[in-house]
Image (spheres, grey):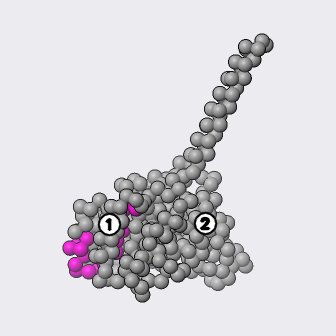
Amino acid sequence: MNRKKFLSSVSVLAIASIKGSSLLHASQSLKKIPLVDTHQHLADLVRFGKGWTSPPLPGNYDMKAYLEATRNVNLVMSVYMEVGVPIARRQEEALYAIEICKDKTNPTRGAIISGDLNSPEFETYISQFKDSPYIKGIRYGFRSIADMKDPHVIKNIKLLGQLHMSLDFEISPAWLPSMAKLIKTCPGTRFLLNHCGNADPRAFLDPSSISGKPNHDAKKWIAAMKTLAENENVVCKISGIISTSSGYPKTAKTLAPGINHCLDIFGPDRVMFASDWPWCLKSNKLEEWVNILKEIVKNRPYRDQKKMFHDNAIKFYSI
């Protein structure tokens, strides 16, 4: 090979090497999945005062603190979740959430506010937000199984669907079958099951490796979750499980069984990542929770991982 051909071949190899490096870099970047946090609590004690809530650690959990907590997880958007302010200040909290959503210097693009489905004033209250692009629905704490059968409650749940709003709920595992019946009666409303259906990781672990008794039976919980998931208008938030109970280390190994059941039961199109910050701090920092969850799902198809961490939330909330 003469000198000219040699230099030419070296140049080709160099260019190929650069291209290969770029492709490798692109591949690595692709794996850094963008996150949408569908359960962002802001316990702003400066704004709403003290005494109405008890975050797991001392501090003020406002937007500044949230941005600091999420700075290393590639967060792109979030959805504000009501924080149980006093009833008299629910209206103020809703306006506070809208104010946050309008501020484009933060990632919040939608909000779930508090609302009482039992209240005779519920329709008036929620209808004021029907044209808001930011209020996406409410979260409601069911008080009993009888509450789930109340005609007035059911009427207001159906109203949410008519207003294109959703209903977040968190209930005891023992109430899951009753909730499945309620959801079936309201096919026009979308529901979000919070915190992995309150799965207790201890139920899926070797009893000799934990302390304390699980909050539910594993087989009964799985059966109830499958019954709930038969309704296509309900999705499951992958959250809360990291702080449900104590007496064992919070690792990918101990949390994987409960989380994998949720992912398999609801499927890749009906699960969403949620931080539950700052209440996740009962056990781990937000970044640690994200890393544990990524470790658990690392062998699932990338497209399914991205659906859970990002795509499903974008589509569900239209953000």
Residue 115 is covered by the magenta coloring: yes
| Left or right of 232 in this view: 7 | right
Front residue of this view, candidates 285 and 259: 285
Can the viewer see residue 228 in this picture?
no
Q: Quadrant of the C terminus?
A: bottom left
Picture disc at residue 99 = 1
Q: Hey, which residue is sitting farthest left in the picture?
A: 124
Q: What residue sits 36% from the left and 55% below the top?
A: 318
Front residue of this view, candidates 144 and 302: 302
Counting from the top left corner in percent of width and height, residue 264 is at: 55, 59
Picture disc at residue 288 = 2
Amino acid type of the residue tagged 2 in the rendering: Glu
Q: What residue sits 61% from the left and 61% below the top?
A: 291
Between discs 1 and 2, the one toward the N terminus: 1
- Give the magenta-colored segment's residue range: 108-127
* Alpha carbon separation for disc pair 1 and 2: 29 Å
Counting from the top left corner in percent of width and height, residue 277 is at: 50, 71
Q: Is residue 197 above or below residue 120?
A: above
Q: Hey, which residue is sitting farthest bottom in the picture?
A: 51
